[in-house]
């Protein structure tokens, strides 16, 4: 679940993204301050727009924002008051973390992609399909997990690349908008002492 807010350009609207719409035709059910966005064909909810959001909860920052559990509880109360049966589930786990490639095999349907098994925490691995030329077993890098919003506004969802499941993205310094980032392909390479699963912090993980 991704919360995004940009009062200067969008207005006082908190957008909540809960699923990838995959380009399907969307419908909207507006009730008071709340609009549910859903796929017309299936009725599946993919997002919510909450208007005059700052009147309901405290929102700090712009772009991808993070709410406290009490704030999400307040939003769920508003949803219920408008007759919506679904509720929001808060997720405060970091979405950009240190990962390490532990296994890598060539993609069977590509001459440049690799299927990587990436450790992103204690006893947790995810599969990521990547085409970075510097990817190799043992490399530590920054991983954007599902639920992340990239600096350019793109969202990370589970998906498939040429038929192979991929649950995140290994990031380049340029994709993370880091200062003095090399303008070339290649994921960020972290020193050996970087801690797997640690939340990404530019001051700690980048010396560009």
Image (tube, helix red, strand yellow):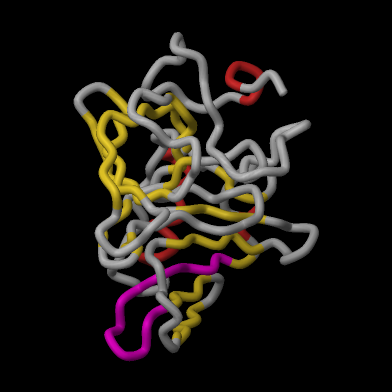
Q: Position of 42 compared to 144: left or right?
A: left
Give the side of residue 126 with respect to residue 74, left or right: left
Q: Magenta stretch: residue 135 in it?
A: no
Residue at 53% from the left image edge and 26% from the top image edge:
189
The answer to whether any part of residue 73 appears in the image is no
Q: Is residue 41 above or below residue 11?
A: below
Q: Residue at x 63, y 36 (%)?
A: 173
Residue 157 is drawn in which quadrant? bottom left
Task: Say which of 203 and 64 sits in front.
Answer: 203
Among all residues in the image, which is located at the extreme top?
193
Residue appearing at x 44%, y 12% in the figure: 192
Residue furthest front in the image? 111
Q: What kind of secondary structure does the magenta stretch mostly adopt?
A: strand
Where residue 26 sits in the image (x, y, percent)?
45, 85
Magenta range is 38-50
Above-or-below relation of 140 to 40:
above
Q: In the rendered view of the protein, which quadrant contains the C terminus?
A: top right
- How many labels, in total? 0
110 above or below 74?
below
Judge from the rendering whether residue 182 lies leftward or rightward of residue 162; answer left or right.
right
User: Which residue occupies the extreme left position in the image?
Assistant: 123
Which of the 4 image quadrants contains residue 153?
bottom right
Q: Where does residue 41 sit, x and y in percent of width and height?
A: 31, 90
Q: Could you tell me if residue 124 is visible in this image?
A: yes
* Front-most of residues 9 and 85: 9
Q: Provide residue 28's location: percent of width, then percent of height.
A: 47, 84
């Amino acid at each position: 679940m991704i919360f995004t807010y940009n009062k200067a350009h969008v207005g006082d609207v908190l957008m909540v993204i809960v699923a990838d719409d995959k380009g399907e035709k969307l419908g909207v059910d507006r009730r008071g301050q709340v609009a549910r966005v859903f796929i017309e064909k299936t009725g599946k909810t993919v997002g919510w727009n909450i208007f005059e959001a700052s009147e309901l909860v405290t929102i700090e920052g712009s772009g991808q924002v993070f709410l406290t559990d009490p704030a999400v509880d307040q939003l769920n109360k508003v949803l219920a008051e408008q007759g919506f049966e679904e509720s929001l589930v808060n997720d405060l786990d970091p979405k950009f973390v240190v990962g390490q490639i532990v296994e890598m095999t060539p993609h069977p349907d590509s001459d440049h992609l690799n299927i990587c098994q990436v450790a992103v925490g204690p006893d947790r691995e995810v599969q990521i399909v990547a085409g970075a030329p510097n990817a190799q077993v043992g490399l530590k890098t920054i991983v954007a997990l599902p639920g992340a919003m990239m600096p350019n506004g793109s969202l990370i969802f589970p998906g498939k690349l040429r038929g192979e499941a991929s649950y995140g993205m290994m990031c380049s310094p340029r994709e993370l908008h880091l200062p003095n980032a090399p303008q070339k392909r290649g994921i960020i390479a972290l020193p050996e002492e970087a801690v797997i699963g640690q939340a990404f912090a530019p001051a700690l993980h980048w010396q560009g």
